[in-house]
Amino acid sequence: MKNILEKEPLIICERLFVYPMEDEAMQFPLLQDVSLTIYKSDWIQLYGWNGSGKSTLLKILSGSTQYRVEGNIQWLGDDQTDQTAILIPIVQQQPGAGLIGASAWEDIVLLLEQYRVPEKTIIPLTNAIIRRFAMTHFSHLPLEHLSGGQLQLAAIAGAAAVSNHLLLMDEVTAMLDSEMVQLIMEQLRTIHNKQKTAVVWATQKEDEIMRTDRVLVVQQGQVTDEGSAEQWFTRNKQSEEGSSRCEQLQFAAPLYVQLFWQLQQKNSSLQLPFSWNELIAEVTQTNEHK
Ligand SMILES: Nc1ncnc2c1ncn2[C@@H]1O[C@H](COP(=O)(O)OP(=O)(O)OP(=O)(O)O)[C@@H](O)[C@H]1O
């Protein structure tokens, strides 16, 4: 994890209690006592099961006014994330949900118009975003000709066009095949690393957690754990079974982490892997040094 002291906050939430609008007595919070800070260039894995409150938290971060909110939330970004009037877009699970144009190119143009970006910058900005997300070959095709992955890429590119500093992703890979998941992940991670765009990535998939991510666990409307990805999967020094935070909160670990835990009992110098490739490289290297 990057040193938090060096990071600038983008959004600060303090002791948020969030209720449905119709719950006038404020009795049934959807989110309870949630405090968190999102920093510039963070990648946060908002990790939790169905119905835990991930989507509600994303909507609150986006600036939605469809809830009753107690507590403080501050948006500190210096452009679109200065959340005084507009919503930060959320990319949804269903490919194509929320796209408003006839093509990916037109969608970004319309979105920039909606966000009142100065007219003469709209076309150059759209073309630049299309290039940045490597979408040139399908950007003018009708949306109905695009694959699920291409639709998701178009939605992510649109969000990135209007929100330079923060992207909010709500289980965007849930309906994609593994090849598309990899493509989307690679594109977005490259953009994140190059542009330092912060990403809040809601997911239920344990293998989407990468080494440099912060993991924020949501359970029954509360943030029950927060730390680095390494901390989430690390068992204590004796490699005691069940001792990682992931296991303590009864979440599944990826198979390569489970296998690593087994191997670690025989060889404590092995490093925690974040993919099959990393585990294979680690084991091969250790065997070569024997
Ligand atoms: N406006 C609302 N009024 C009443 N209950 C709501 C409202 N919005 C969400 N809920 C409930 O709050 C809980 C959290 O919902 P939310 O959609 O935030 O969870 P989630 O973690 O995103 O789940 P999923 O992965 O299924 O999308 C659920 O039980 C849901 O039914």
Image (cartoon, grey):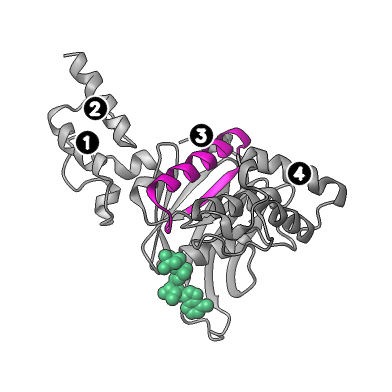
- Quote the CA–CA distance across marks 1 and 4: 45 Å
Residue at image mark 4 = 125
Q: Amino acid at mark 4?
A: Leu
- Quote the CA–CA distance across marks 4 and 3: 32 Å
Q: Secondary structure at mark 4?
A: helix
Mark closest to the chain's N terminus, 4 or 2: 4
Quadrant in which the N terminus appears: top left
Q: Nearer the viewer, residue 56 or 17?
A: 56
Marks 1/4 in contact by CB < 8 Å: the verdict is no
Q: Is mark 1 within 8 Å of ligand 1?
A: no
- Quote the CA–CA distance across marks 2 and 1: 8 Å
**Residue that appears at 39% across and 45% down:** 209
Q: Is residue 148 magenta?
A: no
Q: Nearer the viewer, residue 257 or 277?
A: 277
Residue at image mark 2 = 270
- Quote the CA–CA distance across marks 2 and 3: 24 Å
Q: Is residue 191 left or right of residue 171?
A: right
Give the image location of residue 189, x and y in percent: 51, 39
Q: Nearer the viewer, residue 40 or 192?
A: 192
Q: Is residue 115 visible?
A: yes
Mark closest to the chain's N terminus, 3 or 1: 3
Mark closest to the chain's N terminus, 4 or 3: 3
Marks 2/3 in contact by CB < 8 Å: the verdict is no
Marks 2/1 in contact by CB < 8 Å: the verdict is yes
Q: Amino acid at mark 2?
A: Leu
Residue at image mark 1 = 260
Q: Is residue 35 left or right of residue 130?
A: left
